Image: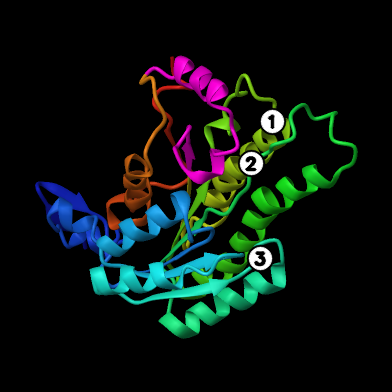
Amino acid sequence: MSETIAGLSLPQDYPEVVKANKPILDLFSLKGKVASITGSSSGIGFSVAEAFAQAGADIAIWYNSHNPEEKAKKLSNTYGVKVKTYKVPVTDPDAVEAAIAQQVKDFGKIDIFVANAGVPWTKGPLIDPPNHDEWNKVINLDLNGAYYCAKAIGRVFKKQGFGSLIFTASMSGHIVNVPQMQACYNAAKAGVRHLATSLAVEWAGFARVNSISPGYINTEISDFVPQETQNKWWALTPLGRGGHPRELVGAYLYLASDAATYTTGTDIVVDGGYTRP
């Protein structure tokens, strides 16, 4: 038998959250959910962690070098949620597996996973670096790291029967940036975006998979870029400026929440219009 809400007949295989007919704002609540976020000690990752904590989620913060313990305590005290930190190099698949297993023990489950850790390409034209080290560094962290995380969390989601995986891709996976030369980063992020859409099909029976493609967001990851170059970016961006992380996190909240139960295999571009002039 089917239920009827607002005059629409709902088949039995609809999610319970749909059949519950909750007010729309309630669907964006993450209360009772657990979110694990890589690269979340600063920048976009920490802004996502804070937004999820505000929405009621318990948070697992991943870091590699600088322990954000004080930030984690502040999040927990401010928003009344559980927050723990984990030192994990995402380029080490065994460490990733162990961290996710530990988080399941610590929190009981993982509802949301954000594969966010990444580094930029800083060496200019591809043929200039004297060896392959810089290429391997970016590919290993930005693409292989995302794969290691996806493989490990996918097994958890399949066992649970639910989950939402969100990759941080980039507008650089859609277009070629100018004036900087960064073919390696562009290729890595295009790979992340297509990995997301591919896994959305593979995992359709038990989890949703999506990606977000930020444009130029004002965080410390771009501190190395000369102001002259950044001015050229703004000239090519219809909104004429870089974005603030708070202008980005709403997209993550949507994809993480029950408001997005029919959204999988999509990529949300948040770039001030850069790729859509």
Q: Earlier in the sequence, mark 2 or mark 3?
A: 3
Give the residues drawn in magenta, as a range: 212-238
Answer whether labels 1 and 2 touch (C-beta < 8 Å): yes
Query: To which residue does mark 2 refer?
Result: 120
Residue 182's disc number: 1
Give SS at disc 1: loop
Q: Residue at x 53, y 32 (%)?
A: 171
Residue 89's disc number: 3
Give SS at disc 3: loop
Q: What amino acid is found at the position of numbered circle 1 in the picture?
A: Gln
Residue farthest along the front direction in this orientation: 227
* Image coords of residue 270 (percent x, y): 41, 34
Answer whether labels 1 and 3 touch (C-beta < 8 Å): no
- Mark 1–mark 3 Cα distance, whole angstroms, equals 23 Å
Q: Residue at x 41, y 80 (%)?
A: 107
Residue 192's disc number: none
Position of 163 compared to 80: left or right? right
- Mark 2–mark 3 Cα distance, whole angstroms, equals 16 Å
Judging from the image, the colouring scheme is rainbow
